Image: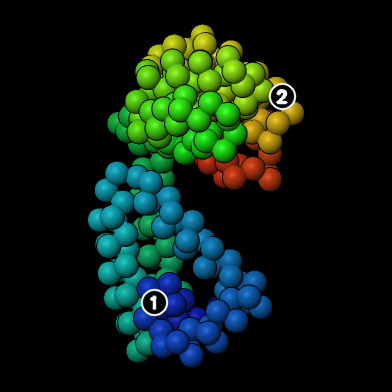
Amino acid sequence: MNEKDYIDLQKYRAGEMAEAERAVFAERLKNEPELQQEANWQAETEGFLQRKAGAAELQKTFAEAGKSYFTEAKVVRKSRLRPLVWAVVVTAAAIILFLLFNPFAEADLYEKYHAPIALSLLDKSENTENARRAEAAFNAGNYAEAYELLGIYLSENLNATQAKLARGIAATQIEKYPEAEAILLEISRGKSTLREEGSWFLALLYLKIDEKEKAKNALEKIGQQSKRYAAAREILREI
């Protein structure tokens, strides 16, 4: 890559290219592995920063620093470009490593990675009133109520795996940990399409109760085809 490539990549990612120019550059990204690798590295770095406290300010700093360096690069001899580029990269890497290994950071992995899922039961049950109430309570975050209503729902729908998963999540939220573990273990060991979702929420339960080795075992069961795979790999690197 030359200095123009770095400048163009900055403009492309910042949305500063005209439509025609952007289309041409997008085609280059498809066909040039080195350019694509650099774009991926920048995207991964940006994603990492967004998940850290103060990431917005850091990104602003990097963007301003990068714009300054790449603007200067237009008038600097090629022999001096590489040190300028690496100055930005090394500075970014140093700050990222500090954030990642900072002994003063106290990240709560459960809070960081737990995100509500939507429950949909109405099209799967004849008892629409109970299904509606259970669904509404869970989706509103009323987990104590949802836990009880889902228990009733499951007494009438024994094989409703989605409802079981929701009840396991609700049990985790209201600190009924033994019940949550039993439910999520059953799902993670089963053969349903929600098997890996069971492993994911089981791992989150273990993180919440500080059972990191059990969390690792659950996360290792999440395969590459799962939408949870990337997040599972992130957690494994953090614990």
User: Which comes sooner in the sequence, label 2 or label 1?
Assistant: 1
Query: At 53% from the left edge and 33% from the top edge, which residue is drawn?
Result: 121
Q: How many marks?
A: 2
Q: In the figure, 233 relative to 87: above or below?
A: above
- Measured as percent of width and height from the top left, residue 139 is found at 40, 34
Q: Helix or strand or loop: what does disc 1 sit on?
A: loop
For residue 24, the mark is none
**Label 1 packing within 10 angstroms: few (<14), some (14-19), many (20+):** few
List the residue tagged with mark 1: 15
Q: Is residue 111 visible?
A: no
List the residue tagged with mark 2: 190
Q: In the figure, 181 relative to 232: above or below?
A: above
Query: At 31% from the left edge and 51% from the top edge, which residue is drawn?
Result: 55
Q: In the figure, 218 relative to 114: above or below?
A: above
**Label 2 packing within 10 angstroms: few (<14), some (14-19), many (20+):** some
- Measured as percent of width and height from the top left, residue 140 is found at 35, 33
Q: Name the kind of residue labelled 2 in the image.
A: Gly
Q: Are marks 2 and 1 in contact (CB under 8 Å)?
A: no
In-image side of 181 versus 71 (left or right): right
Query: At 38% from the left edge and 65% from the top edge, which residue is drawn?
Result: 87
- Measured as percent of width and height from the top left, residue 98 is found at 36, 43
Quarter of the picture holding the N terminus: bottom right
- Measured as percent of width and height from the top left, residue 125 is found at 58, 30
Q: Helix or strand or loop: what does disc 2 sit on?
A: loop
Alpha carbon distance from label 2 to label 1 = 46 Å
Locate residue 142: give its quadrant. top left
Q: Name the kind of residue labelled 1 in the image.
A: Gly
